[in-house]
Amino acid sequence: MNCPCCKAELHANYGGVHCPSCGKDLPTAPNPAPVLNPGQKVSWPFFFLALVAPVLLTILTARFSPKSPIDPAATAFWSAVISGIVSGMMLARRLGRSGEAKALFCIVLVPAMFVVSLVMNFFGCLAGSQGFRIH
Ligand SMILES: [Zn+2]
């Protein structure tokens, strides 16, 4: 790029607002696109992992029950609690624009995602205990 005033050649990534040779103001480069707050974006692979991981965990514990000391029903419940909190909060952060809206979405979405996860875990538990049991 060259200075529009004195035509002096400027370094490609010269960051100053004044020409180093004539001192006149340089046309300012357009600002780069504002970076999205990372908290506003949903990491979808992580979101689906938060939903699917408890189901897999429940299938595994159900499959090895009763040999396994881990109770598949307790696993289904507590992993659904964790999954509901994680995925519900991720959605709330994505949907809510203000702090109050995020909190409100949290109150609604965390129990909703907990129920979704619990239902999925219930079927995971059934599948684990009936479908894939090793004899
Ligand atoms: Zn200049």
Image: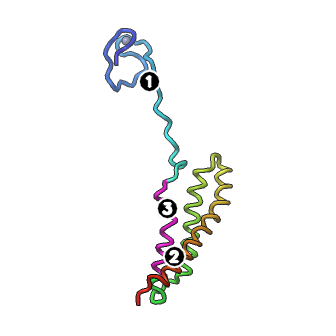
3 above or below 12?
above
Neighbour tally class for label 3: few under 14, some 14-19, many 20 plus, Cα within 10 Å: few
Which residue is denoted by mark 2 in the rendering?
124
Region rendered in magenta: 43-62
Coordinates of residue 27 in the picture (x, y in percent)? 44, 18
Residue at image coords 36%, 16%: 20
Q: Are marks 2 and 1 in contact (CB under 8 Å)?
A: no
Q: Are marks 3 and 1 in contact (CB under 8 Å)?
A: no
Which residue is denoted by mark 3 in the rendering?
48
Residue at image coords 55%, 71%: 120
Q: Is residue 42 left or right of residue 21?
A: right
Give whichever of discs 3 and 1 has the lower sequence position.
1
Q: Nearer the viewer, residue 35 or 43?
A: 43
Q: Is residue 42 magenta?
A: no
Mark 2–mark 1 distance (CA, rounded to whole Å)? 56 Å
Coordinates of residue 63 in the picture (x, y in percent)? 46, 83
Mark 3, secondary structure of its residue: helix
* Screen quadrant of the C terminus: bottom left
Ligand 1 lies under 8 Å from the Cβ of mark 2: no
Give whichever of discs 3 and 2 has the lower sequence position.
3
Q: Is residue 44 magenta?
A: yes
Coordinates of residue 71 in the picture (x, y in percent)? 52, 83
Residue at image coords 63%, 49%: 96
Task: Give the amino acid at mark 3.
Answer: Phe
Which is the main secondary structure of the residues drawn in magenta?
A: helix
Give whichever of discs 2 and 1 has the lower sequence position.
1
Neighbour tally class for label 2: few under 14, some 14-19, many 20 plus, Cα within 10 Å: many
Rendered-image quarter of ligand 1: top left
Which residue is denoted by mark 1 in the rendering?
29
Q: Are marks 3 and 2 in contact (CB under 8 Å)?
A: no
Q: Which mark is residue 57?
A: none
